[in-house]
Amino acid sequence: MKSPRHHANVVFGLAVALLTACSDGKDRAPEASEPPPPVAPTFLPISQPEVEDPPDAGTLFLLSTTFDLAEVGYQQREYFLSGEASAFRNVGELGTDGAWEAEPAETAAYRTRVVVYRPVDPADFSGTVLVEWLNVTAGFDTGPSYGSGHVEILRRGHVWVGVSAQRVGIEGSETPVVPLHLKAVNAERYAALEHPGDSFSYDMFSQAAQALREPGTVDLLEGLDVERIIALGESQSAGRLVTYINAVHPLYNTFDGYMVHSRGDGAPALAQAPLEPIATPDSVRIREDLNVPVFNFQTETDVLLLGAINDRQPDTDRFRLWEVAGTAHGDYYSFIIGREDTGENPRFLLVEEANGIPGFLNCARPVNAGPMAWVFGAALRALDTWVRDGIAPPTGDLLTVDDAGGAFLKDDLGNVLGGIRTPWVDAPVAILSGEGQEGDRLCFLFGTTVLFDAAQMASLYVDQAGYEAAVAAALDEAVASGFLLEDDAARIRAVAPLQWQSQVPGE
């Protein structure tokens, strides 16, 4: 089903006709002082991909949540998408302001895959489809935004779609962490996939959205009535979305909103080898003439370690920037324990010490166990409301840095000042940092956790009742400010006694 956004030109034409019909019928030229009527924007059509089922050879592969989706009323299905995709070239300079002009360039054949998580009962569908640009930093497809936000996504009845937009997810890289790209995991099932290179990834992503919005012979959503489609991507994929928003969205008006989750400085190339590379500036803002909302969600790691402080920009009626205190680019919940979380047990909110992902990522110090997932859930809710109802999210303070912009300012305990505040930093049980650490190659993204000992807990809160009161006060403030959800508040309250008892045993 076409959304109201896609009927903009038709609605504009009808409005002009109605005004003409209601006039006095006299032919007269407009007065000189009258401005010309607004011109409705026009957009290029998006190519319709062919949709087909994969061969019946094994099951779909995607490292994701580990619980059975049927437990929460969902089902999963995989499809192959194929067609001709365009690369793009710039028309004029690609400036730091992001107000880029681009046009379609070379074309190439492709066949990729998408994974769809949808409510079993159509009555449970919210009308919102979240389309994630799957991340390939590890050398295979992952959905880190789904990993952080799945509790909110599933309880709201959203559809989530993961798109294998980049070549590495299908063919692998020269130095993979582990060989989990699709053709290595199941050569028979994924043999037919064909990726012509990441210069074509932007149009492949657009065509996935087109297949969702205006189904062809095969409907990816099996009859669900789509009302809005929101793109999201984390880390490298967030950077891809920045390039997409600045260069490609103005051509096609593809999505109704964007969640740019943990971007670093700059943005990926518009085109790259084997095509003639088209580099983008070292620092890039998101263009200000947007017609849809863009939400930029940032952790401590993103701001300084990954250099996004250079891309900070003020909030507008189409842009929001949240920088969240006590968070890291990758964390304990999103990549370790959260894969089992169905949204009920408070133990998933415990601040604990773990040195990575057993058998995969071994870090020198315990990784960050901060509040990223819970604030990200609030951000997803805020963006959906913004797109759905036009109500903009609250504006948050930025993380506080020194005058040189090279270091965070911190409180007496060691946690950063400023930013989005939660009980994790305003009623803390640890120093939670996103400033990097040593270990395996991705450990620098995972921050650190240093738990307070029993004596420090007692000096801060006296006893369990004092700690629970501090958590309740900070929680009430965060919920009232719109940075945590009341849906999560019960679990945050319930974890407080567990947290105290884990750090002050035997009291």
Image (cartoon, rainbow, N blue to C red):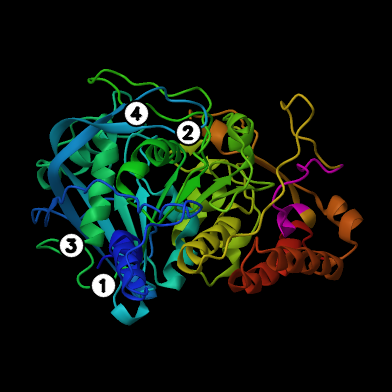
Q: Name the dominant secondary structure of the magenta segment.
A: loop
Residue 473 inside the magenta-drawn segment: no
Q: CA distance from mark 1 to mark 3?
A: 11 Å
Q: CA distance from mark 3 to mark 2?
A: 32 Å
Q: CA distance from mark 2 to mark 1?
A: 35 Å
The kind of secondary structure element at disc 2 is loop
User: Which stretch is magenta?
Assistant: 412-425
Residue, far bottom? 123
Tell me the quadrant of the picture where the C terminus can be found: bottom right
Q: CA distance from mark 3 to mark 4?
A: 28 Å
Q: Quadrant of residue 400?
A: top right
| Residue ID for mark 3 | 215
Q: Is residue 121 visible?
A: no
The kind of secondary structure element at disc 1 is loop
In this picture, is 101 found above or below 160?
above
Q: Nearer the viewer, mark 4 or mark 1?
A: 4
| Residue ID for mark 4 | 270
The amino acid type of the residue labelled 1 equals Leu
Left/right placement of residue 325 relative to residue 403 reads: left
